[in-house]
Structures are given as C-alpha cells and as structure tokens.
Amino acid sequence: MSTTVSPLQSARTELASFGDRLVGADDARYDEARTLFNAMIDKRPALIAFCTSRDDVAAAIRFGREHDLRLAVRGGGHNGGGLASVDDGLVIDLSPLDEVSVDPAVRTVRVGGGCVWGKVDAATGPHSLAVPTGVISSTGVGGLTLGGGHGYLARRHGLTIDSLLSAELVLADGSQVTASADENPDLFWAIRGGGGNFGVVTEFTFRAHPLETIVGGPTFWAIEDASELLAAYREWLPSAPRNVMAFFNFHTIPPVAEAFPEELHLRKVCGVVWCVDASDEDAERAMAPLLSVAEPLLHGVGRMPIAALNSAFDGLYGPGDQWYWRGAFLRAIPDEAIAVNRSFNERMPGFKAGSHLYPVDGAVNDVAPEDTAFGFRDATWSQVFIGCDPDPASASAVRDWTIGYHEAIVPFSAGASYVNFMMDDEGQGRVKATYGSNYARLQQVKAAYDPDNVFRVNQNILPA
Ligand SMILES: Cc1cc2nc3c(=O)[nH]c(=O)nc-3n(C[C@H](O)[C@H](O)[C@H](O)COP(=O)(O)OP(=O)(O)OC[C@H]3O[C@@H](n4cnc5c(N)ncnc54)[C@H](O)[C@@H]3O)c2cc1C
C-alpha cells in the first residue's frame, strides 16, 4: 500500500523551525488564516506559512519550489483579485513582519513587508511626520507600495513609491538583496510600480514628510448636481496649489446614525474628500471655488491629524464585503464621460458601491514616466469603479454593474488601469497596457531576477 505525503506533512518536517506558524487545512486556524479582505474570493491554499524573518521567507520559497507549489505572497490581504492567496499552493504570509521604526532626525521610516498603513501612521504621527499612504488604513503597505500608491498626499509628495528610498527583498533563488538608487537600481526601478513580480519585500524604507495637521473630510452634494460639479472640478483642481487635495467621488450616504444625519441616509450623492495642508482661513479660501458651484448637502470638514483622515472610512469598509473592482487612467473627463458617471451612479448596486477619481498631477508629475515602472504619470486622473456590497447574494449584480460602468468609460480612457485597481480576470493584455512602454524593460528585469516566474500570483509580468 502506498502512502502519499501531503505538502503539510512534508512542511512540518522540512520547515520544522516554523513550529505552529505553519497552517494547513487540518488546522482549526485554517479558515481564519486563509480569509481575505474581499469575501468574494474563497481560495483554499495547501499551506500558509507565517514568516517572522527574511530567512523564513527564503525557506518558504525554497520549500514551495522543491514541492512544485505555486507561491502567493500576502501583505495586507486587501487585493481586489485576491492575489495574496492561491488554491492548492503555498501562501507566504508576511503579517508577522509588521515592525515600524521611525528615525525623526533623518526623517526616514523602516516598515516591515507585512505591515498595514494604520501602524505606519501611528508611528509617524507623534513625530509630526507622514508617509504618503492610501485612504483606508487597514490596506497593506506591501501591495499598495509595489503598485504605486494613490493617496491624500499625492499632489504634495507624489505616489507612495516616490517616497520609497530602499527595499530589502528575498529573491526567487532565496538570496537576499537591497534595492535602492545605488544598489540593484534596475530592481529598484521595477518594484516601484511592478508589483510583487520580482521578489518578496521584507522591509521598506520610506522618506517621511513634515506634517502637523490638515483640514480634511468630505463634502457631499445631491447626485443631481453631479454634472455641474464634475465639470467644475475637472477645470479647477489641476490648477489648484499642491497643498490642496480633493478626490472626486460618487457614493451613497451610509445609514450610520453617528456619522450622518438621518434625512440623508441612503441618498445617492457626489462629493469630494478634502485634504488641505494650510491654515483654516487658507483652506476655506482654497475650497471656496468648488463649494460655490452648488449648495452641499453635507460639509463635514475639520482640522485633524492625517492619521484620522486616513482611517476615517475604515469602519465603513471593513473586511468581509463582496468586492469587484475595475480602474481606468483618464487624461480628460469630457462631458460624455460625466454623463456616463452620473447615469451609472444613479443606479449603484447597494450603499457601499461608487467611484473615485484620484488626481495624478502635482508632485506625481515631477517624476518622468520612464523613471519608475509606474508609467501613467501623464494621466490626469486614476478612476476606480467600486462594486461593493455586504450581501453575498449581490455578488453578480456588483460585478455586472462594475464591468458595465468600466466598459462605458473605456472609450474616454487612456486605455489602461492602475494595477492595484485590477481584478485577476482582466488578462495579460491589460497588464501590458498598464505598463505601456515600460513593459519591455520590466520583462528584462523579470528575466534577470525571476527567470522561472516563481512569483506569478500577481498582475504577472512575463520574463523576457
Ligand atoms: C478598501 C480598500 C482601499 C484601498 N485604497 C487604496 C488607496 O487609497 N490607494 C491605492 O493606491 N490603493 C488602494 N487600494 C488598492 C490596494 O493598493 C491594493 O488592493 C493592494 O494590492 C493592497 O495591498 P495589500 O498588501 O493589502 O494586498 P495583498 O492582497 O496582500 O497583496 C497584493 C499583491 O501584492 C503582493 N505583495 C503584497 N505585499 C508584498 C510584499 N511585501 N512583497 C512582495 N509582494 C507583495 C501580493 O503578492 C499580491 O500580488 C485599496 C484597496 C482596498 C480594498
């Protein structure tokens, strides 16, 4: 009688130093360990290895390769397409690598590869420093940074990658390297936008920027005012000073009594979320051009630490919802596109769906498109179409609405999407389009650092 040894049994022998940090399907912790932020994705890996060091990561990569297991790397687990996990494969879970250390004298921050942004904000805030992050603080530093990083400080300080000074990586052959402007500069170029294609980042070092408090929060208008407002916004924001950030959005006012007046609950709206780094008087002056376009339903703006703004919507967007995303870079927002936006958002599926337009201007344009793998710096906006609802029965409605909305905007788009706003079903053509003229160089770097495409559970760049 022959007996088959499962990957888990082999791992318990060959990766004995992990002890109970290895989780397989026979473990009571399995379901919790494999759960992703997006409840629409239900993957069942053979094995999850919680890594506490670079050596753990190297050992897990080696084990996966020897046993022919597909490898997935998990940072914060927020990816829309569920790219932090893999059916029947090995998940390298970086969540224990979540140390943050700030050096206020030189304004740098070292961040573990499995950390989430809220922890970075908590460490930098007391020093009146900030790293450009995303708009929800439970998002992982790893995936967001490696894709580029849109956020409230983008017009002032660029994408998150524009504040990245160096990264420590474990490569597909288990070797450990530094990527920076001076060491392995080709790798450093590629990881600034090229995702997790080149290795596992165990530590990032960022430049932090001095920041006390900002004037932030949302203003919402009736969706009937959307055409006028979006037309005004597209003209006004690109010429506004860099300390003024406002991302346009379409949403439904959530039925949350503590946060919103009851008469507005479930009302479909358009709006902006502000982040203005100025005195109260200057911030008021800066916001005035948009506030005068139409009477807002709600103007919920106040002075706060950036950490409070970065986490203001965390409660609304916790784990466990059904998510389906699409994205599009736009160079302009013609009137026809405004009409499409309004029409789709008048019939959002559920109160958590909507759309955001993140500005790609200001400091983002200080870096040339060929200077980092993130190439679409000549876009003016990066739009995300957000299908989201708590009810699993809504999954296909959420998906259909998002795809329909995206397809209706594509004729007005630059023909590609921010890699972190893509699902896992958009095909290789979309990945190539996202990197545009940088794709061929990315393929060369991939061939040099991961010729066997060991890291392929991502928006995959094929080795040259
Ligand atoms: C609620 C919500 C809000 C968001 N807001 C923003 C925003 O404001 N700005 C923005 O730019 N994006 C935003 N995003 C998109 C976000 O950038 C992506 O979902 C990103 O992939 C999340 O990173 P993660 O580490 O949590 O993801 P994961 O799912 O853990 O990983 C995503 C991908 O990155 C790889 N990866 C992660 N960490 C590492 C690492 N250390 N080394 C190597 N590879 C790694 C993974 O293998 C996978 O391929 C948001 C997403 C959600 C769900």
Image (cartoon, rainbow, N blue to C red):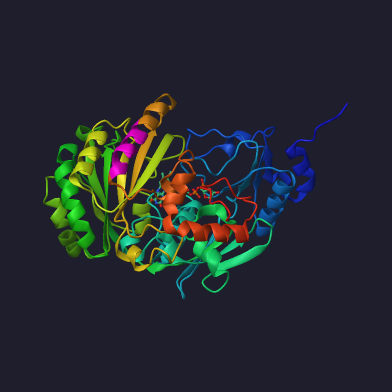
Which corner quadrant holds the N terminus?
top right
For residue 102, above or below residue 397: below
The residue at 25%/54% (across/down) is 302
For residue 16, above or below residue 211: above
Q: Nearer the viewer, residue 103 or 7?
A: 7
Give residue 179's position: percent from left, percent from top: 56, 67
Give residue 163's position: percent from left, percent from top: 43, 66
Kindly give the residue lying farthest to the right in the view shown: 1
Q: Nearer the viewer, residue 276 or 63?
A: 63
The residue at 34%/32% (across/down) is 401
Q: Quadrant of residue 224?
A: top left
121 magenta-colored:
no
Q: Nearer the viewer, residue 386 or 462?
A: 462
Give residue 454's position: percent from left, percent from top: 64, 50
The residue at 46%/61% (across/down) is 123
Kindly give the residue lying farthest to the top in the view shown: 393
Give residue 306's position: percent from left, percent from top: 35, 58
Q: Quadrant of residue 129?
A: bottom left
Which corner quadrant holds the C terminus?
bottom right
Image position of 34 (left or right of 293): right
Stretch in magenta? 401-411
404 magenta-colored:
yes
Image position of 435 (left or right of 255): right
Is residue 362 visible from the viewing direction of this image? yes
For residue 182, above or below residue 430: below
Is residue 193 visible from the viewing direction of this image? no
